[in-house]
Amino acid sequence: MPECELISVGEISGVFGIKGWLKVYSLTDPRENIVTYSPWLIKKGNETKEVIIVDGKRQGKTVVVCIEGVSDRDVAATYSGWKIFIKRSQLPETKEGEYYWADLVGLRVATVLGVELGKVDHLIETGANDVLVVIDGEQERLIPFLQGPTIKKIDLKDNLMIVDWDPDF
């Protein structure tokens, strides 16, 4: 499967209890949504496995899951550090004007005057609003993801985002 069809949704961060449950660092919002995207494709180094989620829930600030075929703490420990991916097709369709972060990463960013600022490297969740991290060589810009005031246009087909932003900032 091409990498572009996979979306990173988290990482297995450790074990939970003695019955083979796993702790998961989730990138979904809300965090516990990660358990609804079964199966997962997990990767570590050059190894890839598909796993089925049997059960899962939020546990305090983390998420814990039980995957098919794992019922022992020692076996569960071997999954620590594996990255979790799902197929793009597993995500619900977005509404007009809504975007998954994965859709924005890699977009070229230009000002309304046509000045190229770089590409979206990743996003940061700040609480007030999300922030785009745009990188051009050594230059890094933090641009608030505010559709309307700052983000003027997102064109996924042309891989371009137009922003109202001072290139010197």
Image (cartoon, rainbow, N blue to C red):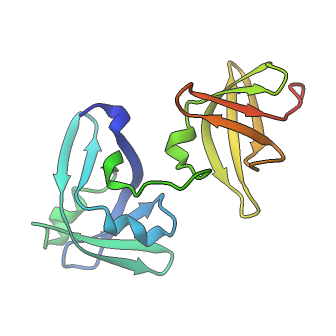
58 in relation to 169, above or below: below
**What percent of the width, then of the height, locates residue 77?**
24, 62
Q: Nearer the viewer, residue 1 or 133?
A: 1
Q: Residue furthest front?
A: 96
Q: In the picture, which quadrant includes the N terminus?
A: top left
Residue 51 shown left or right of residue 42 in the figure? left
> For the point 74% across and 30% down, which residue is it?
140
**What percent of the width, then of the height, locates residue 157?**
52, 29
Q: Is residue 87 visible?
A: no
Q: In the picture, which quadrant includes the C terminus?
A: top right
Q: Nearer the viewer, residue 80 or 124?
A: 124
Q: Is residue 127 visible?
A: yes
Question: How many marks on residues?
Answer: 0
**What percent of the width, then of the height, locates residue 124?**
65, 50
Q: Quadrant of residue 105?
A: top right
Residue 3 shown left or right of residue 141 in the figure? left
